[in-house]
Amino acid sequence: MPLLSKNKAEAVNEFNQYVKPVSLWADAWKRLRKNKMAVIGMWIVGLYLAVTFGAGLLPFYSYTDQELLHANLPPSTRPAGRVAIERLELRRGDILLAMQASSREDLKRDLDRVNEDLDRIRFELDRDPVHKRVYLLGTDYLGRDMLARTVYGGQISLLIGIVGTITAGLIGIVLGAIGGYAGGWADNLLSRFVDIMYSLPYMLVVIIIMSMFKDSSNATVLGIPLNIIILFFAIALVSWLTMSRIVRGQVISLKNSEFVEAARSMGAGPGRIVFRHLLPNTVGIIIVYSTLQFPSFIMNESFLSFLGLGVSAPYASWGTLVSEGVQGMQLYPWRLVVPATAMTIFLFAMNFLGDGLRDALDPQSKNRS
Amino acid sequence: MSRFIVRRLLSIIPTLFIVVTLSFFLIRLAPGGPFSREKKLPPEVLQNIMRKYHMDEPLINQYFRYLGDVLRFDLGPSFRNKDHSVNDLIGKAFPVSLHLGSMALAVALFLGLSVGILSALNQNKWPDYAAMSVAVLGISIPLFVIGPLLMLAFALQLKWLPTSGWIGSRAGWATVILPTLTLMFPYFAYIARLSRGSVIEVVRSDYIRTARAKGLKESVVIWKHVLKGALLPVVTYLGPAFSGIVVGSVVVEQIFVVPGIGRIFVQSALNRDYTVIMGDVIVYSIILMGANFIVDVLYSMLDPRIAYK
């Protein structure tokens, strides 16, 4: 008799057949795997995480070493010394041509400098292994490898995304759950506070906060530059609002349900009810929202760095790299295109993954946006 | 309805007060000020300057003095831009930003709605796929990536459009195109997705079936019935879209050197020009709250089920 079966892993359906019970997660995973774009997104995100955080183990060039002779080299699969010589020769040709038209003094000085550099590279070409380097994605204005800089810049961008999501999540979940469960004046106070914070132009407040601490960029706490820490806080401070609203709404809609009543009648305290019974039921929506919020952290950080108010040298984030790239984009487009593409692909993948997770964990919302 | 409007308007005042207070003390807490430069001023000069701007008084006095000035619509003198008052600077820059922002919003709405509705009516055919791919792209790429890339392509390589400036410059109205396109792109994308989703939902609903069963022409069904129902989520999104455009214009004005309040804001934040930052924040807050208010009113007009709480 199936009904007498003691085996917990088995259940029966309405036709009295054995079926394997499917948990929410297994079900969601099945749905997620069917969504091709979400799966591709997941692989790309995984690859980014592995490459950026495992960058120390991979054979990248240093992202801080400046090799001025290699400044602004285009992407190429040939050794850097050769590429640099070609560029210098082209430049020398241009200068010689210009000198036929005019006899300006600075042209002569330029020519001398180019000749000097050429002699130096030709001399060092076979002696110094530096010139054997291959810059697959070109170099920046100080001769640093764009590939390495993009990878290490991604490290900071992703870190800010992860830390921001966790901080905002924790604050939002705790405050939302307290407000939703307690109700009364505590809920009122928290909701009013969230409402007011919502109507603040928060990105502008963050800009003010960042500009205040712009000068203290040399200080470090536990080896992390102070202004990166402040950036974490400034962004997290204003991003827990939506999370707390969502969690509050979920908790309110669940707190009068039978399973909570059952828990209460068995003597469970409010802490136990909130953390053991209510929050686990909102995990799906929390995960979905966090995934969707993650790219917005990266965008906000890059937004600030782009304005010169975020991560500062010697550290770099994708935003810093893009803003550096903009400065020379007419002559050296790869300096803009490389970090911009890296960032866009990641955000793209993250969005597909977030959409996929939402459809998988909360199938009813499928057509909502 | 009118009670709802009045109450909603009155609630702006305390929020504005909090914004002013918060940003005032935030700015003053920071080390350094508008007069700290590389080359140190002689102490007597510094003292005189501080006295002139009442900055030698206790902070709380300065705060109340500032509040009083703001109530008289006087945002004070600029510390860095000696010849201009903040009212002047913002008064000149505000119309530019307003122009840019409203154009971006209008284009985003128009294009977003048309693309969204067309994709919904051609669901799962190639125009739908193409439009939605562009839309996801628009949501994923940050403004400060689109902007420079557009500039690189259309201004520097093809040389069709000017790289920077605004209507007053030699290039004239052509300067408007790139900043507007950049600023509207993410919101166009989101509105397109949103309206597609809601049109798909509405088309399946009972009242549309009724409308068709009555023998209405397809164009009447779409224009009179589907559109009104589908507009609702888009109207809700207008509030966030508007504030996004306001913040986004900070970056876009920076990229395309547009002389609007966003540019002033970033410059004054970098220079610690206290009064200009404050003035900018106040203007931005009023715009944002005003926009949210209008959206709320619009929303309650479109959806009678919403009570005027």
Image (spheres, coloured by chain):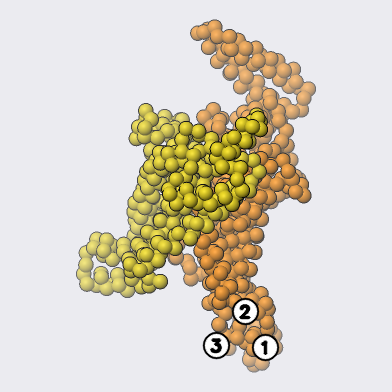
Chain colours: A orange, B yellow
Quarter of the image holding residue A17?
bottom right
Q: Is residue B232 above or below residue A153?
A: below
Q: Is residue B87 above or below residue A22?
A: above
Look at mark 1 in the image and give the residue it sits on: A266
* Same chain letter for marks 3 and 2: yes
SS at badge 2? loop
Dot 3: few (<14), some (14–19), or many (≥20) neighbours within 10 Å?
few
Tag 3 or tag 1, which sits nearer the N-term?
Answer: 3
Look at mark 2 in the image and give the residue it sits on: A21
What's the amino acid at mark 3?
A: Phe
- At horizontal 27% and vertical 61% (from top left) the residue drawn is B223
What's the amino acid at mark 2?
A: Pro
| B122 to the left or right of A66 | left
The answer for how far apart the CA atoms under marks 2 and 1 are is: 27 Å
Tag 1 or tag 2, which sits nearer the N-term?
Answer: 2
The answer for how far apart the CA atoms under marks 1 and 3 are is: 34 Å
Q: Chain of mark 2?
A: A
